[in-house]
Image: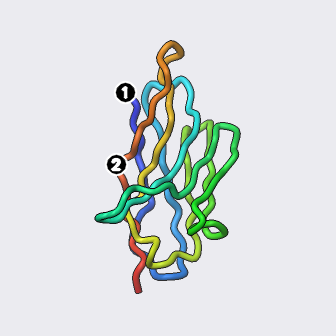
Amino acid sequence: QVQLVESGGGLVQPGESLRLSCAASGSIFSINAMGWYRQVPGKQRELVAGISSGGSTNYADSVKGRFTISRDNAKNTVYLQMNSLKPEDTAVYYCNADIQYVPWVPSRDYWGQGTQVTVSS
């Protein structure tokens, strides 16, 4: 079984930084795109940032210039460096990855359990 385990959430003040990590474990043949989403109560989950297997990145307009997504393919891990955090960044952040666990089965999406990020003074 494949699992995504997130870490790094917490409570910070406006303007501070946090770094989220998400490690994929289990039987993994290959990992394609990885990304971070966030969700607040009563709203749809939204894409924050994504990164392809080759390292191409994309960001939501609201986080461009403040957040950076990266990945370590040797560790099957994706990171989200969040700087200049704002109260509106408060949400549960979820890791997502498109993973193929054996060569003869198509890849599918996996999700982490979510980690709370709260930005408040």
The structure residue drawn at horizontal position 45% and vertical position 49%, both measured from the top left corner, is 95
Query: Is 105 left or right of 1, judged from the image as shown?
Result: right
107 over 24 or under it: above or below: above
- Quadrant position of the C terminus in the picture: bottom left
The structure residue drawn at horizontal position 58% and vertical position 34%, both measured from the top left corner, is 32
Q: Position of residue 49 (x, y in %)?
A: 57, 55
The type of residue carrying mark 1 is Gln
- Quadrant position of the N terminus in the picture: top left
Q: Position of residue 91 (x, y in %)?
A: 39, 66
23 over 108 or under it: above or below: below
Label 2: element kind? loop
Q: Callout 2: 10 Å neighbours few (<14), some, many (20+)?
A: some
> Which residue is denoted by mark 1 in the rendering?
1
Q: Position of residue 117 (x, y in %)?
A: 40, 67
Q: Callout 1: 10 Å neighbours few (<14), some, many (20+)?
A: few
Q: Given the current orientation, which residue lies at the most extreme top position?
A: 104
The structure residue drawn at horizontal position 30% and vertical position 65%, both measured from the top left corner, is 41
> Which residue is denoted by mark 2 in the rendering?
113
Label 1: element kind? loop
46 over 73 or under it: above or below: below
* Figure colour scheme: rainbow
